[in-house]
Image (spheres, rainbow, N blue to C red):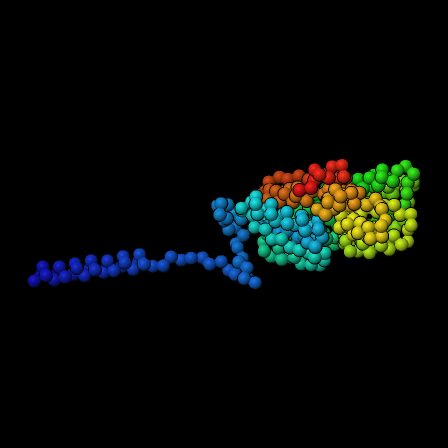
Amino acid sequence: MKKKVLAAIMAGVMLLGLTACGSKEQAPAETDTPETGAAGETEEPANEENASGGETIKIGVLMKTMSDTYSNKLGEAIQAYATDTYSEVELYLMDGQADIAKQISQAEDLIAKQVDVIILNPQDADGSAQVLDLAADADVPVIEVNTETTRTDYVSFVGSDDRQAGEIMGNFVMEQLGADGGQYAILEGEMGQSAQLLRYEGLENTILANEAFDCAATLSANWSRDEAMATTEDWLGKYADLKAIICENDDMSMGALQAAESQNRELVIIGTDAIPDALQAVKDGRLSGTVLQDADTQASTSVDVAVKVAKGETVEARYDVPFQLITIDNVDDFIE
């Protein structure tokens, strides 16, 4: 009898042990679900690892505008290069729509996203400097690209010396008009931007300093093709001896060319940026020349520098991308 009772007790203990083991194996594993922010965006933690096993680098890009042909090319090149080259980079590209207040607000948004570094394409040389204050308060380093603020307390600048573009254009027009000189006009970009200020300074160093050449008018067309066309139409009605128009970008040079062609006026017209339709117009012999501003190199260098800064590596204070004069003699080297 005692043996039967003992056997029953042992069987019960074994059954309880098996039940407990079965319960432990079936318990569901715990999972972490990322929080979802506004508009369904998944907010990733700042130290999240990417597919390659390293920490994700968050780069915010503040473009002054994506409506200008060159700025659009630069912004798209930044996006493409970052995507193609760095699997660990998460890029936030913002279009400032040529509005200083909007660009500053977007900087606040990027800081709230806890980006590791900001690439700034300033809308205004003075006004956009507020981005530097916001970033400094949040301990976020800033790289400036293409245009720069009057303040220089950023980590690095990637771009071209816009004085050089002005000097190239001024020297080209003097060469085309010859030693006897002639009358010309200047279409400026948006006032207060570093490209406008420095390209004009380059003109001051060259053609504006030469008394053999007469500057009939200087007016801002705000980098706009339509505004440049309207302004040139007005000038052609006012200045019968006008021989040349110097444009601080190629959207304006194409607008000036359109106005001149509509009135059958042959003018020396040159711009800067080497956008595709300007290059084609040079090849066709319609546009006198353009000055290449290398968007692809500015884009790739700015992203490379931003990644180095995010990793704590040493970078240079400035990275210069030289301008190049393009005329009918060498345009085939630059057309894709």
Name the one closer to the observer, 245 or 303.
245
Name the one closer to the observer, 233 or 92.
233
Q: Residue at x 34, y 59 (%)?
A: 27
The N terminus lies in which quarter of the figure? bottom left
Percent x, y of residue 322: 72, 38
Examine the rendering and report whether any part of residue 155 can be seen: no
Q: Is residue 281 above or below residue 112?
A: above
Q: Is residue 93 above or below residue 318?
A: below
- For the image shown, how many numbered marks are present on the structure? 0
7 sits left or right of 133 in the view? left
The C terminus lies in which quarter of the figure? top right
Percent x, y of residue 121: 69, 50
Percent x, y of residue 137: 65, 53
Q: Residue at x 9, y 59 (%)?
A: 3
Would you identify the image quadrant in which residue 156 lies? top right
295 sits left or right of 206 in the view? left
Percent x, y of residue 105: 67, 58
Examine the rendering and report whether any part of residue 301 can be seen: yes
Q: Residue at x 53, y 48 (%)?
A: 56
Query: Looking at the image, which residue sits at the far left?
Result: 1
Q: Residue at x 50, y 48 (%)?
A: 50
